[in-house]
Amino acid sequence: MRIGWPRFISLSTLAAMLWVGAGLLAGALFKTQIALLLIHLDRIGSIAFLGALVLLSLYVGFKWWERSRFYKCCAWPESAWRSFMR
């Protein structure tokens, strides 16, 4: 399937406008909640930052464990790699 440049540009522009519009609409709808959240985060800023850092570290650690478990489970023998790389 091929699509012409003018149609691609117009559809891409429309998609970008919908994406930005959704973010702006969400911001307009939840502006009071966002303001309250920012005030609350200002009070507990360093604790919130450390909490986010811990959550990020846990996520990265889980993904590393999941990846290492996958490679242990599905490891190819060396002879298979040699025949695959030919």
Image (tube, rainbow, N blue to C red):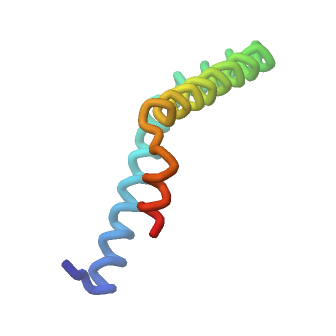
Specify the quadrant of the image occupied by residue 58: top right
Q: Residue most toward the front?
A: 79
Rendering quarter of residue 9: bottom left
Q: Is residue 21 above or below residue 30?
A: below
- Work out which quarter of the rendered image holds the N terminus and state it: bottom left
Looking at the image, which residue is at 38% across and 69% down?
13
Between 36 and 48, the one lying in front of the other is: 48
Residue 86: x, y in percent? 45, 70
Q: Is residue 65 left or right of residue 12?
A: right
Q: Which of 75 and 19 is in front in this view?
A: 75
Residue 80 appears at what percent x and percent y? 43, 52
Give x and y (percent) for residue 7.
Answer: 27, 80
Task: Compare residues 54 and 70 and report the one nearer the observer.
Answer: 70
Residue appearing at x 41%, y 51% in the figure? 21
User: Horizontal placement of 64 versus 21: left or right?
Assistant: right
Whole-percent x, y for residue 29 in the image: 42, 33
Instruction: Classify 14 as above or below 30.
Output: below
**Vertical placement of 24 versus 9: above or below?**
above
Q: Spot the residue most to the right.
A: 46
10 to the left or right of 51: left
Count every numbered label the image shows and give the total. 0
Residue drawn at point x = 47 percent, y = 39 percent:
75
Name the residue furthest left: 1
**Residue 18's image quarter?**
bottom left
